[in-house]
């Protein structure tokens, strides 16, 4: 990692602004599956050889698919305007919020395109989201059945339950969202000792010994000097980025970064420039311009230049090009903020994220961020790195100063999961789950591609987007899968580009091969029925090439 005194003066420092049958069935309900007797753990080496990075796949759909997709949206929008006309003349009831008669001359609150889109497009497929779950979100769950009598404006529960739905949507990568009594003994003990709520910030009376134990364990797990935990993953980004950069600083953000990163960047007051997804030529061009031109108008040097990327991109399933970005960071004396919300625990030989996956020293990354809400089956997030960075955030981060401290049972759940992954609990269960996740991920991805689906992302990413494209197929796909007792997440505009609606599968170590085979069998049948097997194995123009010799890593 580049130390502060080694940085170019234009870039400043990162310190501050100023400077198996019944048993198997019960096991699945409990959120895990039986995989034989758990063996005792042997001490392993914490250093691993870098894994060869598989290329991210962004296959391009045939031209007719894009044409039909835009035609579909065009037809729906035309009908939307027609229905708005019927509502305006009183021939159709308007369920949406609208302007009061005495405020017609004011600036409209409900007449923008967002409300038009929600009223006329989203409402048609609203039944595919916010489904009420009434069980543990493990590899299978139960869904409360609901129906709508007014075309998805309101819903009512029927009193029936759809049981044993295979869960292909939760971020339960390592299967730690479980309620097995044997696994949760320590969580129950900490709840008895500390209770459920802290009712204070850590700066006041909410700093418990269990919080400090968690932070020490996280730092040890990541291989860095220090770490700090926060109660909310989203706020870990949105409230800490403004503490690290401000006016006079430059943020270079990947175009597909999560909303929490975007919000944090906007709240900081720093200048934001966006580079193409995982495109090193685009990033290097922005870095060159930033160094050569400086700030707008004054042309003074930037106080700091911060590159913000994610380990795994949650809508694309792609992995960050970490070695290349680190090379550019060193070359231009910038800082790197790495969001490992989806990658920590999910990739790497021992689950330590993309730094381990690529064989990179985590200390080369200036700010390591991650969440506990996915691989660890809990809640919250962390910032890790140099001790001076963490100490600064303890007194300058809004999330650290004003937010209530993490709930003790949640903290213990995270500690339990990390210890299991590290093997310090005396078993190899954690590493078995990491390996199982990798096997399940590659198996599902390879089979989907063999069937003819267009699947985005990296072969090692447990986030598996399956492209549906046409808006009419999004709702039909989700409803048909639920009828087959498979729960999926479908995503469309504005969360994705308007012509790239998709279903997003999240693979878990708790998924058995039988579950995945059932999902694949139903996908194969449904893919033929609604005709979403668009693959022609043609690379997309999105994957732009670049010359790696321009930014070779320092030896």
Image (tube, rainbow, N blue to C red):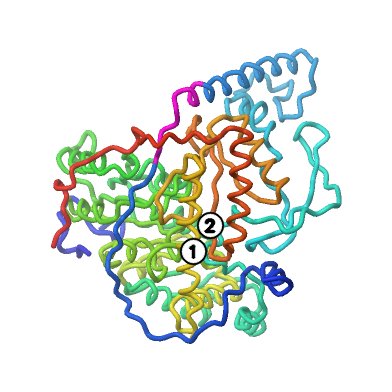
Q: Is residue 57 above or below residue 385?
A: above
Neighbourhood count class around disc 1 (C-alpha, 10 Å): few under 14, some 14–19, many 20 upward: many
Work out which residue is located at the far right of the displayed protein and give it.
159
User: How far across and down, in percent of the image, does residue 311 sit?
Assistant: 38, 55
Q: Secondary structure at mark 2?
A: loop
State the image quarter where residue 283 is shown: top left
Mark 2 lies on residue: 507
Horizontal and vertical percent position of residue 412: 56, 77
Classify residue 134 as left or right of residue 534.
right
Residue under the point 39% across and 48% down: 268
As drawn, is 512 to the left or to the right of 480?
Answer: left
Q: Which residues are magenta?
A: 58-67
Disc 2 to disc 1: CB gap under 8 Å: yes
Residue at 47% x, 33% y is 497
Q: Say if residue 425 shows up in the picture.
A: yes
Front residue of 347 and 91:
347
SS for dot 1? helix
Q: Position of residue 447 (x, y in %)?
A: 50, 50
Q: Quadrant of residue 510?
A: bottom right
> Split into 4 quadrants, where in the image is the N terminus?
bottom left
């Amino acid at each position: 990692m580049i130390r502060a005194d080694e940085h170019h003066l234009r870039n400043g420092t990162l310190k501050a602004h100023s400077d198996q049958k019944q048993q198997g069935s019960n096991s699945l309900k409990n959120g895990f599956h039986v995989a034989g007797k758990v063996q005792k753990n042997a001490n392993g080496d914490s250093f691993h050889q870098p894994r060869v990075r598989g290329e991210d796949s962004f296959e391009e759909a045939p031209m007719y698919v894009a044409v039909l997709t835009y035609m579909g949206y065009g037809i729906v929008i035309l009908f939307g305007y027609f229905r708005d006309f019927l509502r305006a003349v009183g021939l159709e009831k308007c369920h949406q919020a609208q302007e009061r008669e005495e405020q017609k001359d004011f600036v409209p609150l409900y007449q923008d395109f967002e409300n038009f889109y929600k009223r006329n497009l989203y409402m048609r497929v609203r039944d595919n989201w916010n489904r009420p779950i009434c069980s543990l979100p493990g590899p299978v769950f139960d869904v409360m059945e609901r129906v709508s009598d007014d075309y998805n404006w309101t819903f009512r529960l029927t009193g029936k339950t759809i049981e044993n739905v295979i869960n292909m949507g939760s971020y339960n990568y390592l299967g730690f969202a479980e309620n097995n009594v044997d696994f949760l003994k320590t969580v129950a003990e900490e709840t008895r000792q500390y209770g459920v709520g802290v009712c204070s910030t850590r700066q006041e009376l909410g700093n418990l010994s269990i919080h400090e134990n968690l932070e020490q364990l996280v730092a040890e797990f990541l291989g860095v000097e220090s770490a700090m935990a926060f109660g909310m993953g989203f706020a870990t980004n949105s409230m800490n980025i403004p503490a690290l950069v401000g006016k006079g600083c430059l943020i270079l953000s990947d175009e597909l970064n999560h909303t929490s990163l975007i919000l944090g960047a906007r709240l900081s007051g720093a200048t934001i420039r966006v580079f193409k997804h995982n495109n090193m030529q685009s990033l290097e061009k922005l870095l060159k311009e930033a160094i050569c031109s400086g700030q707008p108008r004054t042309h003074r040097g930037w106080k700091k230049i911060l590159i913000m990327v994610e380990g795994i991109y949650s809508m694309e399933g792609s992995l960050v090009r970490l070695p290349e970005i680190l090379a550019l960071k060193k070359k231009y004396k910038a800082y790197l903020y790495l969001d490992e919300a989806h990658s920590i625990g999910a990739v790497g030989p021992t689950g330590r994220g993309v730094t381990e996956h690529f064989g990179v020293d985590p200390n080369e990354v200036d700010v390591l961020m991650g969440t506990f809400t996915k691989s660890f089956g809990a809640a919250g997030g962390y910032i890790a790195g140099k001790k001076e960075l963490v100490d600064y955030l303890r007194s300058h981060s809004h999330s650290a100063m004003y937010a209530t401290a993490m709930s003790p049972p949640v903290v213990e759940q995270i500690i339990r999961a990390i210890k299991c992954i590290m093997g310090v609990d005396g078993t190899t269960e954690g590493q078995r789950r990491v390996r199982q996740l990798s096997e399940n991920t590659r198996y599902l991805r390879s089979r989907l591609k063999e069937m003819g689906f267009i699947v985005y992302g990296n072969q090692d990413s447990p986030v598996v987007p399956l492209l549906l494209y046409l808006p009419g197929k999004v709702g039909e796909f989700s409803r048909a899968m639920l009828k087959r007792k498979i729960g999926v997440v479908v995503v469309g505009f504005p969360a994705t580009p308007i012509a790239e609606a998709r279903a997003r599968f999240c693979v878990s170590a708790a998924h058995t091969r039988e579950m995945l085979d059932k999902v694949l069998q139903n996908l194969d049948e449904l893919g033929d029925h609604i005709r979403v097997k668009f693959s022609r194995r043609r690379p997309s123009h999105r994957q732009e090439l670049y010359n790696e010799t321009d930014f070779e890593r320092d030896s």
